[in-house]
């Protein structure tokens, strides 16, 4: 059987995919795209092409792109997932949600679990729970052990005047220490930042960012807040 992994190219969805692959499961990466882009969070956009190439190039996994709109995002996502589940070979739907109340996995579970009773709906956060509560230290330790990351988006309200320090940087333990000192949640849920997986530890392949442009965007969910994103124009796989 196959796991359907909602995949954005960030650390959380990648950890979800890695756990499924480590369990010996076949995986299918579902990329949610809006007008040619994959929506990471709150209007932060990484081009679908690079997300698909991360899934194919770093992990060797097949990709399906689900087109959605801002207005009907969840409805169209449910329709897309439901269509894939009807094919009958998917028994797990997996996301990088870290168990916050409005997590998309909870929405998919609510809408689809009664229809597809043999399908499990799983968040990566559930694998890092201690006594029923998410353990961020355990999770981040595993992230740093397995992934090479790059910060590609910052919410300007929290990072005003500090964007140049963080945007486009490799994410590591020292970076997390700096972010914590600013009062930012290291998981990116409060003072928002977004990541892109640019490599796997102990694996030769990684993504080389050859050119990019920093630009300001308006938040998708928090529409009164601006973000800075690193719009990656050219990249390649390197050994």
Image (cartoon, rainbow, N blue to C red):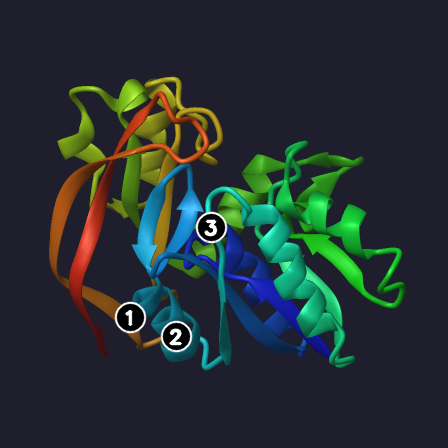
| Residue that carries the numbered disc 3 in the rendered image | 69
State how far apart marks 2 and 1 are (Cα): 7 Å
Mark pair 3, 1: CA separation: 31 Å
Identity of the residue drawn at 49% across and 76% down: 63
Q: Quadrant of the C terminus?
A: bottom left
Residue on which disc 2 sits: 58
Q: Which residue appears at 37% of the width and 42% of the height? A: 194
- Which residue is labeled 1 in the image? 206
Question: In the rendered view of the protein, which quadrant contains the N terminus?
Answer: bottom right
Q: Is residue 73 left or right of residue 92?
A: left
Q: Is residue 3 above or below residue 126?
A: below
Q: Secondary structure at mark 1?
A: strand
Whether the residues at callouts 2 and 3 have beta carbons within 8 Å, the answer is no
Are the residues at dot 2 and dot 1 in contact (C-beta closer than 8 Å)? yes
Q: Position of residue 90 (x, y in %)?
A: 73, 75
Query: Where residue 237 sits in the image (x, y, percent)?
Result: 24, 76
223 in relation to 134, above or below: above
| Left or right of 105 in this view: 114 | right
Q: Is residue 195 above or below residue 89?
A: above
Q: Residue at x 46, y 25 (%)?
A: 190
Query: From mark 2 to mark 3, how far is it between C-alphas?
Result: 28 Å
Earlier-in-chain disc, 2 versus 3: 2
* Image depth: mark 2 or mark 3 in front: 3
Residue 149 visible to an observer of this rendering: no
Left or right position of 186 against 168? right
The residue drawn where x is 45% and y is 76% is 59
- Image side of residue 78 versus residue 209, left or right: right
Judging from the image, what secondary structure is the residue with disc 3 in? Answer: loop
Crowding near pointer 1: few (<14 within 10 Å), some, many (20+)? some
In the rendered image of this protein, does residue 183 appear above or below residue 193?
A: above
Q: Earlier in the sequence, mark 3 or mark 1?
A: 3
**Residue sticking out furthest to the front:** 71
């Amino acid at each position: 059987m196959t796991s359907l992994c909602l995949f954005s190219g960030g650390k959380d969805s990648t950890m979800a995919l890695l756990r499924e692959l480590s369990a010996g499961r076949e995986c299918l990466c579902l990329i949610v795209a809006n007008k040619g882009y994959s929506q990471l969070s709150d209007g932060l956009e990484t081009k679908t092409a690079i997300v698909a190439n991360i899934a194919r190039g770093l992990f060797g996994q097949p990709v399906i792109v689900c087109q959605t709109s801002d207005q009907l995002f969840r409805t169209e996502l449910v329709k897309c997932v439901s269509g894939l589940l009807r094919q009958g070979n998917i028994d797990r739907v997996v996301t990088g949600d870290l168990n916050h109340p409005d997590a998309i996995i909870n929405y998919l579970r609510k809408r689809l679990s009664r229809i597809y009773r043999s399908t499990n709906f799983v968040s990566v956060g559930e694998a890092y729970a201690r006594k029923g509560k998410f353990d961020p230290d355990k999770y981040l330790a595993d992230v740093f052990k397995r992934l090479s990351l790059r910060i590609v988006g910052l919410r300007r309200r929290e990072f005003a005047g500090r964007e140049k320090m963080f945007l486009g940087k490799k994410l590591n333990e020292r970076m997390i220490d700096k972010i914590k000192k600013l009062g930012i949640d290291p998981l990116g849920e409060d003072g928002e930042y977004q990541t892109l997986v640019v490599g796997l530890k102990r694996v030769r392949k990684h993504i080389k960012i050859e050119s990019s442009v920093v630009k300001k965007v308006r938040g998708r969910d928090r529409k009164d807040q601006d973000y800075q994103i690193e719009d990656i124009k050219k990249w390649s796989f390197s050994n």
